[in-house]
Image (cartoon, rainbow, N blue to C red):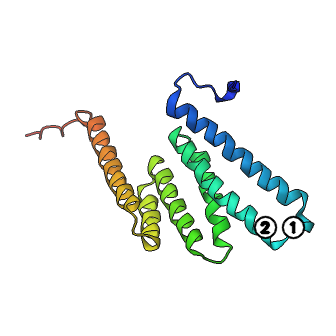
Protein backbone atom coordinates (compact mmCIF):
# COMPACT_ATOMS: atom_id res chain seq x y z
CA UNK A 1 0.00 0.00 0.00
CA UNK A 2 1.24 3.46 -0.92
CA UNK A 3 1.66 5.98 1.93
CA UNK A 4 0.50 9.50 1.04
CA UNK A 5 3.34 12.05 0.77
CA UNK A 6 2.12 13.99 3.81
CA UNK A 7 2.62 10.94 6.02
CA UNK A 8 6.18 10.20 4.88
CA UNK A 9 8.78 11.39 7.30
CA UNK A 10 12.52 11.47 6.65
CA UNK A 11 12.98 10.44 10.27
CA UNK A 12 10.57 7.52 9.95
CA UNK A 13 9.66 5.41 12.96
CA UNK A 14 7.74 6.94 15.82
CA UNK A 15 7.58 10.42 14.32
CA UNK A 16 5.94 9.15 11.13
CA UNK A 17 3.55 7.01 13.17
CA UNK A 18 2.69 10.01 15.35
CA UNK A 19 2.00 12.12 12.26
CA UNK A 20 -0.25 9.46 10.71
CA UNK A 21 -2.11 9.09 14.00
CA UNK A 22 -2.61 12.84 14.26
CA UNK A 23 -4.00 12.93 10.73
CA UNK A 24 -6.43 10.15 11.64
CA UNK A 25 -7.55 12.01 14.79
CA UNK A 26 -7.98 15.23 12.82
CA UNK A 27 -10.14 13.38 10.31
CA UNK A 28 -12.31 11.88 13.04
CA UNK A 29 -12.75 15.33 14.60
CA UNK A 30 -13.67 16.78 11.22
CA UNK A 31 -16.21 14.02 10.64
CA UNK A 32 -17.74 14.46 14.10
CA UNK A 33 -18.04 18.23 13.65
CA UNK A 34 -19.46 17.73 10.16
CA UNK A 35 -22.08 15.30 11.50
CA UNK A 36 -23.00 17.70 14.26
CA UNK A 37 -23.26 20.72 11.96
CA UNK A 38 -24.96 18.98 9.04
CA UNK A 39 -27.71 17.19 10.92
CA UNK A 40 -27.95 19.46 13.93
CA UNK A 41 -31.74 19.50 13.96
CA UNK A 42 -32.11 15.77 13.47
CA UNK A 43 -29.51 14.50 15.97
CA UNK A 44 -30.89 12.19 18.61
CA UNK A 45 -29.56 12.35 22.14
CA UNK A 46 -27.94 8.97 21.61
CA UNK A 47 -26.13 10.24 18.52
CA UNK A 48 -24.99 13.38 20.38
CA UNK A 49 -23.57 11.14 23.12
CA UNK A 50 -21.73 9.06 20.55
CA UNK A 51 -20.26 12.19 18.96
CA UNK A 52 -19.14 13.39 22.38
CA UNK A 53 -17.54 10.02 23.09
CA UNK A 54 -15.57 10.37 19.85
CA UNK A 55 -14.52 14.01 20.03
CA UNK A 56 -13.11 14.19 23.55
CA UNK A 57 -10.69 11.25 23.20
CA UNK A 58 -9.77 12.39 19.68
CA UNK A 59 -8.85 15.85 21.01
CA UNK A 60 -6.77 14.33 23.81
CA UNK A 61 -5.01 11.84 21.54
CA UNK A 62 -4.35 14.51 18.93
CA UNK A 63 -2.81 16.67 21.67
CA UNK A 64 -0.56 13.76 22.67
CA UNK A 65 0.62 13.40 19.05
CA UNK A 66 1.28 17.13 18.79
CA UNK A 67 3.30 17.09 22.00
CA UNK A 68 5.54 14.41 20.50
CA UNK A 69 6.33 16.82 17.68
CA UNK A 70 6.88 19.73 20.12
CA UNK A 71 3.85 21.66 18.84
CA UNK A 72 2.71 22.72 22.32
CA UNK A 73 0.47 25.64 21.38
CA UNK A 74 -1.70 23.58 19.04
CA UNK A 75 -1.68 20.70 21.53
CA UNK A 76 -2.91 23.03 24.27
CA UNK A 77 -5.74 24.13 21.98
CA UNK A 78 -6.90 20.51 21.64
CA UNK A 79 -6.59 19.94 25.39
CA UNK A 80 -8.57 23.08 26.16
CA UNK A 81 -11.29 22.04 23.70
CA UNK A 82 -11.59 18.63 25.36
CA UNK A 83 -11.64 20.05 28.90
CA UNK A 84 -14.21 22.70 28.03
CA UNK A 85 -16.45 20.02 26.49
CA UNK A 86 -16.08 17.92 29.63
CA UNK A 87 -17.01 20.88 31.83
CA UNK A 88 -20.46 21.10 30.23
CA UNK A 89 -21.64 17.52 30.85
CA UNK A 90 -22.45 15.28 33.77
CA UNK A 91 -19.61 13.32 35.31
CA UNK A 92 -19.10 9.60 34.79
CA UNK A 93 -16.14 7.39 35.60
CA UNK A 94 -14.92 7.51 31.98
CA UNK A 95 -15.29 11.29 31.78
CA UNK A 96 -13.36 11.68 35.02
CA UNK A 97 -10.54 9.62 33.50
CA UNK A 98 -10.62 11.81 30.38
CA UNK A 99 -10.53 14.94 32.54
CA UNK A 100 -7.52 13.62 34.47
CA UNK A 101 -5.75 12.80 31.18
CA UNK A 102 -6.59 16.27 29.87
CA UNK A 103 -5.20 17.94 32.97
CA UNK A 104 -2.00 15.92 32.69
CA UNK A 105 -1.65 16.95 29.07
CA UNK A 106 -2.36 20.58 29.99
CA UNK A 107 0.36 20.40 32.63
CA UNK A 108 2.77 19.03 30.03
CA UNK A 109 1.93 21.84 27.60
CA UNK A 110 2.38 24.46 30.30
CA UNK A 111 5.65 22.89 31.47
CA UNK A 112 7.00 22.94 27.91
CA UNK A 113 5.99 26.62 27.65
CA UNK A 114 7.88 27.43 30.86
CA UNK A 115 4.73 28.20 32.86
CA UNK A 116 5.69 26.06 35.85
CA UNK A 117 3.23 27.49 38.41
CA UNK A 118 0.28 26.90 36.07
CA UNK A 119 1.54 23.39 35.33
CA UNK A 120 1.73 22.65 39.07
CA UNK A 121 -1.86 23.88 39.50
CA UNK A 122 -3.05 21.57 36.70
CA UNK A 123 -1.22 18.66 38.34
CA UNK A 124 -2.84 19.46 41.69
CA UNK A 125 -6.25 19.35 40.03
CA UNK A 126 -5.38 16.07 38.27
CA UNK A 127 -4.19 14.50 41.53
CA UNK A 128 -7.63 15.17 43.03
CA UNK A 129 -9.18 13.05 40.26
CA UNK A 130 -6.73 10.15 40.15
CA UNK A 131 -3.86 8.66 42.09
CA UNK A 132 -2.28 7.38 38.89
CA UNK A 133 1.49 7.02 38.67
CA UNK A 134 1.36 9.39 35.69
CA UNK A 135 0.75 12.30 38.08
CA UNK A 136 3.90 11.39 40.03
CA UNK A 137 5.90 11.14 36.78
CA UNK A 138 4.54 14.50 35.63
CA UNK A 139 5.47 16.10 38.96
CA UNK A 140 8.98 14.69 38.64
CA UNK A 141 9.28 16.02 35.08
CA UNK A 142 8.07 19.43 36.28
CA UNK A 143 10.67 19.51 39.08
CA UNK A 144 13.37 18.50 36.60
CA UNK A 145 12.29 21.20 34.12
CA UNK A 146 12.41 23.85 36.86
CA UNK A 147 15.85 22.64 37.92
CA UNK A 148 17.10 22.70 34.33
CA UNK A 149 15.72 26.20 33.78
CA UNK A 150 17.42 27.50 36.92
CA UNK A 151 20.75 25.88 36.03
CA UNK A 152 20.49 27.30 32.51
CA UNK A 153 19.95 30.78 33.90
CA UNK A 154 22.92 30.37 36.25
CA UNK A 155 25.15 29.16 33.44
CA UNK A 156 24.06 32.03 31.22
CA UNK A 157 24.79 34.64 33.89
CA UNK A 158 27.99 33.06 35.21
CA UNK A 159 30.80 35.54 34.71
CA UNK A 160 28.52 38.08 33.05
CA UNK A 161 27.86 40.21 36.08
CA UNK A 162 30.82 42.36 36.91
CA UNK A 163 32.17 42.40 40.42
CA UNK A 164 31.44 45.54 42.40
CA UNK A 165 34.06 48.25 41.99
CA UNK A 166 36.67 48.50 44.72
CA UNK A 167 36.07 51.09 47.38
CA UNK A 168 37.94 54.37 46.96
CA UNK A 169 39.99 55.48 49.89
Looking at the image, tell me whether mark 1 or mark 2 is earlier in sequence order.
1
Image position of 120 (left or right of 54): left
Q: Position of residue 99 (x, y in %)?
A: 55, 66
Q: Position of residue 62 (x, y in %)?
A: 61, 48
Which residue in the rendered view is the most extreme toward the bottom?
Answer: 90
Residue placed at 48% from the left, 59% from the top? 104
Residue placed at 53% from the left, 33% from the top? 15
Task: Say the numbered circle drawn on residue 43.
Answer: 1
Image position of 22 (left or right of 11): right
Q: In this rendering, is residue 95 above or below 144? A: below
Q: Distance from label 1 to label 2 (Cα)?
A: 6 Å
Image position of 47 (left or right of 70): right
Looking at the rendering, in which quadrant would you find the N terminus?
top right
Q: In this rendering, is residue 15 above or below 133? A: above
Task: Say the numbered circle drawn on residue 122.
Answer: none
Q: Out of 47 and 70, give the one closest to the viewer.
A: 47
Classed neighbour count for the residue bearing mark 2: other residues with Cα under 10 Å, few (<14), some (14–19), many (≥20): some
Amino acid sequence: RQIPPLCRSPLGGARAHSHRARVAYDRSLWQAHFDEAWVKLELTDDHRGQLFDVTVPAHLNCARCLLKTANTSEAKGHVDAALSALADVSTTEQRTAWRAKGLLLRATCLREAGRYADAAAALDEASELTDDAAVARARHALRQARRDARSGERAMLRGKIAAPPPEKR
